[in-house]
């Protein structure tokens, strides 16, 4: 999904109009997360853990049917005005050119850092609220669902902002900077103050994926290579999603505890912001 969809968007939309559709498409991650955060507790109550897996099976089948019957590719990528795309298929030399592109790997690292902190946060925060504040896991999951809802709200807005300002870099870098104090504040807010913190974190987080997806296609400067570019970005995304929750849980269970684990997210955001600023993009 992450490889194919941006490639299709790159075929249909010119570079200066691509931020908004990328923002709309990026809703798929927080929307799916929100549905599961809300649906998982009652599913487990009535059908045990198998109910969660069957719901995932249903959604996978529905996605396949929707894609097969409704998604059509344009006849030729070159139909997008103002682009240097050609109808020729990418070659092995094109693949080597993509894999040697330093800015693309830097963008992949930015997305790795973002997914590291974001997935770690939404994975472990319900347990943190339950263990330290006595909030039930069902209510804690609801709070994280609110976070993902705010992320959904900000995704289309971030695409519009990116297109209006003409900058992909600011949409990637500024939110990473803003997330640093938000993650640090988790340990110091009261039970009542956690909702505003969740709202701010969710809204700010929605800007980064839109900037990354939009910039990645532009970095390689050829819409034919959009799928390859997104594959590189996907390496960073999945690395962050793998390492974030694992290392966070390891620190919580070790000598560091919750305080060290949450503060660990701050320098990771800083590394992502620095890498994003180094990338040669508009």
Image (cartoon, rainbow, N blue to C red):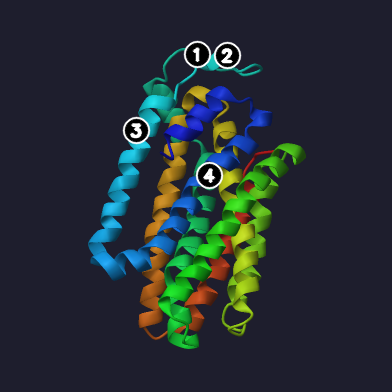
247 relative position to 46: left or right: right
Per the model, the C-alpha gap separating discs 2 and 1 is 6 Å
Q: Nearer the viewer, mark 3 or mark 2?
A: 3
For mark 4, give the secondary structure.
Answer: loop
- Which residue is found at the position 66% from the left and 62% from the top? 177
Which residue has dot 2 on it? 79
Q: Is residue 264 above or below residue 39?
A: below
Which of these two is toward me, 258 or 201?
201
Which residue has dot 4 on it? 26
Q: Please provide percent x and percent y for residue 255.
A: 39, 86
Which of these two is toward me, 59 or 7?
59
17 relative position to 256: left or right: right
Q: Where, quadrant-wise, is the N terminus in this rendering?
A: top left
For mark 3, give the secondary structure.
Answer: helix
Q: Is residue 222 visible?
A: no
Per the model, the C-alpha gap separating discs 3 and 4 is 20 Å
- Which residue is found at the position 59% from the left and 44% from the top? 210
First-in-chain label (2 vs 4): 4
Per the model, the C-alpha gap separating discs 4 and 1 is 24 Å
Q: Quadrant of residue 241?
A: bottom left
- Which residue is found at the position 51% from the left and 58% from the top? 113
């Amino acid at each position: 999904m992450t490889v194919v969809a941006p490639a299709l968007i790159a075929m249909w939309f010119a570079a200066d109009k691509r931020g908004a559709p990328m923002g709309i498409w990026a809703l798929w991650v927080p929307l799916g997360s929100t549905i599961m955060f809300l649906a998982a507790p009652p599913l487990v109550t009535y059908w045990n853990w198998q109910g969660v897996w069957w719901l995932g099976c249903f959604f996978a089948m529905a996605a396949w049917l929707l894609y097969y019957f409704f998604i059509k590719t344009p006849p030729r990528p070159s139909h997008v005005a103002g682009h240097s795309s050609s109808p020729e298929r990418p070659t092995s030399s094109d693949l080597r050119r993509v894999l040697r592109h330093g800015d693309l790997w830097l963008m992949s690292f930015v997305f790795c850092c973002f997914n590291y902190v974001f997935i770690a946060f939404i994975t472990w925060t319900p347990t943190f609220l339950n263990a330290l504040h006595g909030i039930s896991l069902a209510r804690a999951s609801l709070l994280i669902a609110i976070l993902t809802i705010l992320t959904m709200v900000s995704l289309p807005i971030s695409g519009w902002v990116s297109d209006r300002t003409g900058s992909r870099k600011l949409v990637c870098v500024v939110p990473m900077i803003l997330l640093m104090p938000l993650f640090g504040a988790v340990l110091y807010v009261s039970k009542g103050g956690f909702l505003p913190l969740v709202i701010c974190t969710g809204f700010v987080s929605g800007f980064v994926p839109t900037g990354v997806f939009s910039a990645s296609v532009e970095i390689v400067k050829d819409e034919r290579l959009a799928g390859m570019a997104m594959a590189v970005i996907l390496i960073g995304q999945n690395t962050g999603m793998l390492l974030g929750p694992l290392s966070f849980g390891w620190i919580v269970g070790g000598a560091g505890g919750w305080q060290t684990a949450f503060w660990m997210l701050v320098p990771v955001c800083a590394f992502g912001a620095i890498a994003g600023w180094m990338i040669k993009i508009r």
